[in-house]
Image: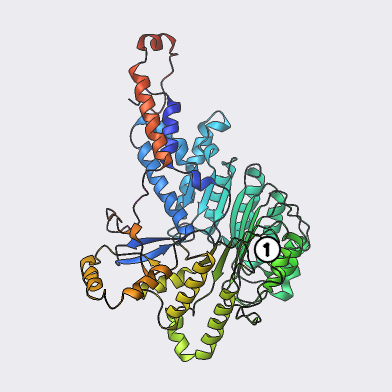
Amino acid sequence: MAAELPGEIWTRIFDLAADEDLLFQPGIPTSMAESAWYKDFIVDQWRLRSPQEAMNLLQRRSYDTKRAIISTCRQWRKWGSEFLFRCLYFSKPAKFILLCAILDASSATTTTVTSSQGWWSRRLHISRDYHRFTGQTTMEDVEQSLVSIIRHCPNLEMFVVERPLGAAFGPIVDALSRHSHRHLHTVRWNIPGESLAKVIWALNALPRLMAAQIDIETPVPIAQEIAYLGSANEMRLKLPRLQQLSLCGYAEEFLEQAVGWEIPALQSFSIDSGTSSHDTPDIIEFLKQHGANLTLLDLHLSPTVDLPVVLDLCPNLSALTFNSDWPFPARDDGSSELVNHPHWNIATIGLHGLSYAFGVGYNAVRASSQPMSARLFTRANDLNFAALNRRNFPKLQRVRVLSRTVLNDLNDENGPQGEGYQRWSKWWKACVSAGISLEDCTGQSLGVLPQDESVDVEDDEEEDIDDEGEEEEEEEEEDSDGTWGTDESDEEEEESEEEWESEPPLPEPNARVMELSRLLEEVRAMNATRDEALIRRIRIPRPPSPVDQ
């Protein structure tokens, strides 16, 4: 059948099977992107998979599918080889050198640029968890290999580096600006603080960028800021297409430089310093220049930010995240002063922090030895949550707890404990009465946990029958308020993976699978009515292919 179908049809089929559309979408996942539960069968525990981990898993699965395609037969290898190079995902440094040799050989034997295998590459991703250097592989080898790979990939659209490349960052980003500047729209760079000037120059050389995430691993000493920046200090960049900017780590100096840049299309801004209090980024000055058009603002900071002023500077926000541990002045109604005026566009609010709120995890143990500190945090949590109402945010539809650590702790202890349960119940009732959805970082209701298949349903039913007369009123109240239970959609979790692999089952057939099925049906119908005699008369003889010899 492979010899009877045109190559164009097989190419379309392989495209559907590879399922890479999500990998090539512009943009970087934000903290509002949903995580997912999966069962780790090795330790027999439920774990949360972050959006970035899910993206890495999708790349590995897609690669396995494409490798199976080209291993089927010679014709499929010829038609499917381009898909093997569209997404380059690395977890081992030695693979850089191997791919470099393959692309060099491909470029040397082709007669046109489009015949080179690197012509098809659109995404290059270097995983953070790649292995240590082994054998003769050095950072210099990696640098030279990556520069050569980029030179062979003129249509590269996405360049993601999760791990610092040290001194290799300069030559690599220079190669991007020389060979990939026409199509590159999404980048993620991980740099030390002393490479900040190189990042600024790189952004200046890539004016077509639509999304950028800059992870700054180390701080720049204040006394040496000007020396490290050099001629990049106070440089006025023009980034007319940049819609998303994400900063992680020690971003104070970068943010100070970005205040004077021209970013007219900026719609999403995220900054994550974690628990670091090295310095407070000047968020207010940045938003004075770039906050008017923002629709998403993600503030994951330890130092408190003047949120009422921030909201006044960002009137078009539809999604906001902030640290719910921040202390703000209290109003007479028991809520905090989050706003100066009602914000009319925000529909989604995400909450960072809340590590003390539900009485679970490490901070629950810590609270027993530091009760005053825990009280300050939980009081701030209560005041801030009380301010998330329709009076301050008339269009508010959902409030989401964003911490995966908190959700894991809740799962380990089967829900909030002590005062944490009372707090959750109070928050849940307030959201229900206001018509607001209270969610966790998976997008499910806060209170829905994954369920093991070994749960004895019959025992639970017997207990309900025995206690039906005594707890009838309590059950009615819990049904209206929500309960800490299990997600019924997870009861059908399949366990067909290999022992060493802890992955959730693949999703049910979607629109792409249905499209592939219809395409195969059309191909079969076309084969049944084809005129072989006519095809033999019009078919042009081809010279033998080197692949078939």
How crowded pointer 1 is (Cα within 10 Å; few <14, some 14-19, many 20+) is rated as: many
Dot 1: element? helix
Q: Quadrant of residue 164?
A: bottom right
In this view, the residue in front, 516 or 179, is: 516
Residue named by callout 1: 196
Residue 308 inside the magenta-drawn segment: no
Give residue 447's quadrant in the image. Answer: bottom left
Question: For this view, does 171 lie left or right of residue 522?
Answer: right
Q: Nearer the viewer, residue 435 or 113?
A: 435
Can residue 280 be seen here? yes
Quadrant location, the C terminus: top left
Percent of width and height locating residue 485:
35, 68
Q: Main secondary structure of the magenta part?
A: loop
Say which quadrant the N terminus sits in: top left
Q: In the displayed structure, would residue 445 be above or below residue 383? A: above
- Image: 488 above or below 404: above
The x and y percentages for residue 127 are 48, 57
- Please state the extent of the stretch shown in magenta in the rendering: 501-508
The three-letter code of the residue at mark 1 reads: Leu
